[in-house]
Image (cartoon, rainbow, N blue to C red):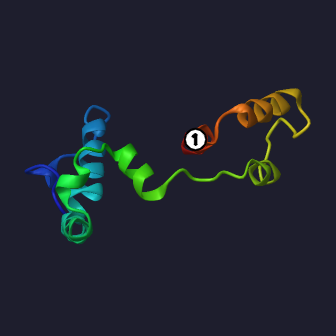
């Protein structure tokens, strides 16, 4: 167990401070709690790609550079979509698929991320 703030073990989580607790717990689990692993990954990554070459990219651009644009198979997505209240033949659902099919491939990937 780690204290997220000094004396944290003696502080109860209440309605008033729960947002701060969740923020601190999330930060700890996603960064400070795995700092050694992150540093090791970055050291290895920067052996392959020097920091100076990638610092001009934001996280979205870097992800696109590394992974490319994912290919989304809309037919597969349609075939494996489960509907609640609606069905595949509902007008709203048909409009949805028609709208999604009209978008460029890059937007299909953005839709899945959403």
Q: Examine the image and state in which quarter residue 30 appears.
A: bottom left
Residue at the right extreme, as displayed: 89
The residue to which callout 1 is attached is 106
Residue occupying image coordinates x 82% and y 33%: 93
Residue at image location 74% in from the left, 50% down from the top: 77
Give percent across and percent down for residue 8. Answer: 15, 51
- Which one is in front, 102 or 15? 102
Number of numbered discs visible in the structure rendering: 1
Q: Is residue 2 above or below residue 92?
A: below
- How many residues crowd around disc 1 within 10 Å: few (fewer than 14), some, or many (20 or more)? few
Q: Position of residue 95 (x, y in %)?
A: 81, 28
Q: Is residue 36 above or below residue 29?
A: below
Write down the quadrant of residue 20 in the picture.
top left
Which corner quadrant holds the N terminus?
A: bottom left
- Please, what secondary structure does the residue beneath circle 1 have? helix
Q: Which residue ends up furthest to the left in the rendered image? A: 6
In this rendering, position of residue 97 left or right of residue 13: right
In the visual, does 110 lie left or right of 26? right
The location of residue 80, given as percent across then percent down, is 78, 54
Question: What percent of the width, then of the height, locates residue 12?
Answer: 23, 46
Image point 19% across, 66% down: which residue? 39
Classify the position of the C terminus by image quarter. Answer: top right
Looking at the image, which is closer to me, 84 or 8?
Answer: 84
């Amino acid at each position: 167990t780690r204290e997220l703030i000094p004396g944290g073990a003696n502080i109860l989580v209440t309605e008033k401070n729960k947002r701060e607790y969740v923020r601190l717990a999330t930060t700890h689990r996603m960064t400070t709690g795995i700092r050694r692993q992150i540093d090791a990954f970055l050291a290895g990554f920067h052996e392959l790609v020097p920091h100076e070459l990638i610092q001009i990219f934001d996280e979205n651009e870097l992800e696109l550079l590394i992974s490319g644009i994912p290919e989304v198979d809309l037919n597969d997505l349609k075939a494996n979509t489960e509907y609640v209240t609606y069905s595949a033949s509902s007008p709203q659902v048909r409009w949805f698929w028609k709208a999604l099919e009209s978008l460029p491939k890059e937007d299909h990937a953005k839709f899945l991320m959403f």
